[in-house]
Image (tube, grey):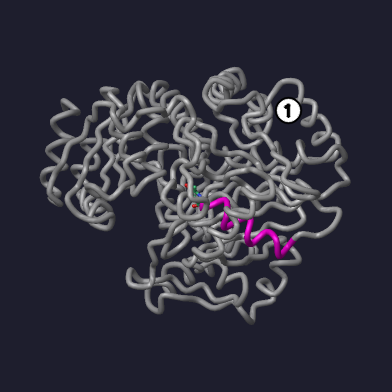
Amino acid sequence: MRYLSTRGHPDRKRFCEILLEGLAPDGGLYLPESYPQVDDATLTRWRGVYHQQGYAELAFEILSLYIDDIPAADLRALCEKTYTAAVFGTGEIVPLRHLEEGLWLEGLSNGPTLAFKDMAMQLLGNLFEYELGRRGEELNILGATSGDTGSAAEYAMRGKQGVRVFMTSPFGRMSPFQQAQMFSLMDANIFNIAVKGVFDDCQDMVKAVSNDLPFKRKYKIGTVNSINWARLLAQVVYYFAGYIQATDDNRQKVSFAVPSGNFGNVCAGHVARMMGLPIHKLVVATNENDVLDEFFRTGVYRVRGTADTFETSSPSMDISKASNFERFVFDLLGHDGARVKSLFSDALNSAGQFDLSSDAAFLAAAQRYGFVSGKSTHADRLATIRDTWQRHEVMIDTHTADALKVAQAYRESGIPMIVLETALPIKFSETIVEALGREPDRPPKFEGIEALPKRVHVMETDVATVKRLIADHCGY
Ligand SMILES: *Cc1c(COP(=O)(O)O)cnc(C)c1O
């Protein structure tokens, strides 16, 4: 398997070469040259693999189709080490919960940080440690977070050989629960940095460090952002696991509803569908930040400025542009790298938007790729959380509520609708209290975490200070 850039660069790379890289040299995103096809017999065999051997073995089967530069025994061991009941709470790893006739919730948020990013990040931590060990290299991950991504990265990388994490976050802006989750980590390779500013200041500091190329090279600065292909690949597995749990015959189709931000999660669903998984619809759900809904309704992709990016009660979907969207457009336009480049580097940079509304490919998108979309608001979230609690005694978080709300419009009889649960309600208790008048249940292992000792470096928005912190702790 070789990987190529969505912007037409002639290089072809192998999995472990792109694992530790961010963007391709031309600014594009990596994709496999082609999607391996899963035939009927294989899908039937995978049913047995999942039910009898478990999620880790299913992950190994799927990853093996894309990774041919890690020996099979090693890859299997990495999957087994990652997807355990101890880490993800149940033997199913991604259990399906039945809500009502034809409607299911797939639980992706039972990992260490109670959000679906653990599904991919936990594997990434083990892959990084393995590959860095093989090369005898080190990596210093520098990131900015306003919540889920940073904690998922820290819990994935804690205690890993060869990796340090320097994670900036806006001082005092994360919820007490989120702060406790991150700042209570005492591992020597994890550095929490609370910056006296807003999230954009954190991001600007990270960019400034990364743009200092000599510093970046000397201190081996890397990232774990959502454009990493390995993260996306790890997410493909739970579409298969969801399908296998909801059906018992390969002639059945299912739809998935996905609370979307950077388009990573639903893009993994697209990959599963391209591999032949019988997915009917992929329902892209957005909140008030409706860049993606606008595209799927109108064909216009228009990135938003800071002033038009809203802070909502489903904050992990508050995006101004969708960083993985380019991958889908590359498929949509028949792998025309030159055209993707002109849209994403020229049109977006000059006009802030592009328009595919009169393109035959866009008109066929719903038919050919199954994509449909919708948008949900704060009032919709409250109503959906309340309704799900009252009718099913199931408490869902705000992001899952966005997906469930939008899913309702696309249910069809005879086709199960699987709504992806991307976080547990405890992470967003303020809105739960607003909707239900009570606090969400707290998993026992998070009892009292706000009272734990905290380890965090507080600093001004100053690039030199963060560089000094990194240099001081690297010892080279
Ligand atoms: C990151 C996140 C999302 C959005 O996922 P994308 O892959 O960026 O589309 C949705 N819900 C939660 C809880 C998240 O943390």
Q: Which residue is mark 1?
A: 50
Judge left or right: residue 41 versus residue 32.
right
Q: Is residue 407 magenta?
A: yes
Task: Assign a secondary structure to mark 1.
Answer: helix
Image quadrant containing the C terminus: top left
Q: Determine the residue located farthest toward the bottom in the rendered image.
A: 358
Q: Where residue 128 sits in the image (x, y, percent)?
A: 42, 29
Q: Determine the residue located farthest toward the front in the rendered image.
A: 437
Q: Nearer the viewer, residue 457 or 431?
A: 431
The answer to which image quadrant residue 249 occupies is: top right
Q: Amino acid at mark 1?
A: Tyr
Q: Which residues are magenta?
A: 398-410
- Per the picture, the main secondary structure of the magenta-coloured stretch is helix
Q: Is residue 53 magenta?
A: no
Q: Nearer the viewer, residue 145 or 341?
A: 145
Q: Nearer the viewer, residue 369 or 438?
A: 438
Q: Is 55 drawn above or below residue 461 in the view shown?
A: above
Give the residue at x 85% y 39%.
40
Give the residue at x 77% y 56%.
280
Give the residue at x 53% y 38%.
14
Neighbor class of circle 1 (other Cα within 10 Å; few <14, some 14-19, many 20+) is some
Q: Where residue 469 sits in the image (x, y, percent)?
A: 15, 36
Q: Is 278 drawn above or below residue 128 in the view shown?
A: below
